[in-house]
Image (spheres, rainbow, N blue to C red):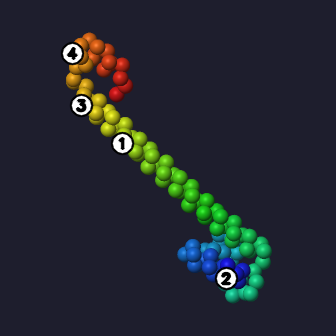
Amino acid sequence: MKETDLIKRTAKDLGMTYKELGEAIGLSEASMRRLATSTEISNQVAKSIEMFLEIQRLKQELEDYHTIKRLLSESSITLQKGLNQSFYINKGETLNGNDSFDKKYQMGVRL
């Protein structure tokens, strides 16, 4: 990406106005508009935009990890419920016809 397109492209790609992008990197809307039409932007502005893009990427990555964590947690809960339901279905059955063994076994299993 050419340096002169950096501001226009970044604002467009992120769906932000020049004002919003400027606020994110500490510049006014007027400064952003001027820089967007300029043939050169300062290294400081370019680095600020690069860092802002990196922060946005990391925020999205963190959100993705939180989603994965939530889905795994929900899957674990669903699996645990399924195992408990399976245990309840089989709870009334006797093992080898030995009722005392069945009672001890049932008492030792966490519900």
Residue denoted by label 1: 78
Q: Are marks 1 and 3 in contact (CB under 8 Å)?
A: no
Neighbour class for label 3 at 10 Å: few (<14), some, many (≥20)? Answer: few
Q: In the image, what residue occupies the spot 60% across and 63% down?
A: 57
Q: What amino acid is labelled 1 in the image?
A: Thr
Nearest to N terminus: mark 1 or mark 4: 1
Helix, strand or loop at label 1? It is helix
Residue 51 percent coordinates (x, y)? 69, 66
* Residue corresponding to mark 2: 5
Disc 4 + disc 3, Cβ < 8 Å: no
* Closer to the eye: label 1 or 4: 4
Report how many numbered discs are placed on residues in the image.
4
Q: Which residue is mark 3?
A: 89
Earlier sequence position, callout 1 versus callout 3: 1
- Which residue type does callout 4 highlight? Gly
Question: Of the residues under marks 2 and 4, which one precedes in the sequence?
Answer: 2
In the picture of the structure, the residue carrying the numbered disc 4 is 97
Find residue 6 and report its image quarter. Answer: bottom right
Instruction: Name the front one of labels 4 and 3.
Output: 4
